[in-house]
Image: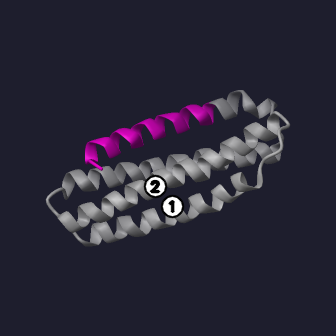
Amino acid sequence: MSGKLMLFIACISGASSVALGAFGAHILKSMLTADQLNIYETAVRYQFYHSLALLANGLLIVYAGQHANSMIWSTISAYAFIAGLLSFSGSLYLIIAMQYHQISTPWWIGMLTPLGGLCFILGWISLAVAAWKI
């Protein structure tokens, strides 16, 4: 994955996390229970944190582009962060939406959240290796 694409995805993810946070604070606050709002805020917070991590990763690739070993680990990190964003935050957004609409949540959707957490951990470890290999 190119540094330019990674930076683009990071910026779009960061912007959408701010928009989703504002949506939650101004619109969903009166519609969701306190527990649901807490879950929603967790999804937004982790999306924002890992958008910043993806941004740092993109900058690392732009900065250290000539180091092949670093590029490989940085690319692994980027894919892990993106997978984590989709599975961790995405599953929490989906769970809240299904609860709000009183649709029963299939068991496998709840399994995506910890899988996303593992992807985040893999992303951070891969980013550390990429930084070490510069």
The answer to which of 59 and 118 lies nearer the viewer is 118
Residue at (68% x, 34% y) in the render: 24
x, y percent for residue 46? 57, 51
- Answer whether labels 2 and 1 touch (C-beta < 8 Å): yes
Q: Which mark is residue 81?
A: 2
Instruction: Name the outermost residue toward the left.
Output: 66
Q: Quadrant of residue 37?
A: top right
Mark drawn on residue 120: 1
- Looking at the rendered structure, the kind of residue marked 1 is Phe
Left of 45 or right of it: where is 76? left
Whether residue 21 appears in this view of the structure is yes
Q: Is residue 115 left or right of residue 122?
A: right
How packed mark 1 is, by other alpha carbons closer than 10 Å (few <14, some 14-19, many 20 or more), is: many
Instruction: Say if residue 32 shows up in the picture.
Output: no
Q: Position of residue 31 (x, y in %)?
A: 81, 31
Label 1: state its secondary structure: helix
Kind of residue at disc 2: Phe
Q: Which residues are magenta?
A: 1-22
Residue at 82% from the left image edge and 44% from the top image edge: 34
Looking at this rendering, what residue extends furthest in the top direction?
A: 27
Query: Residue 26's x, y, as percent?
Result: 69, 28
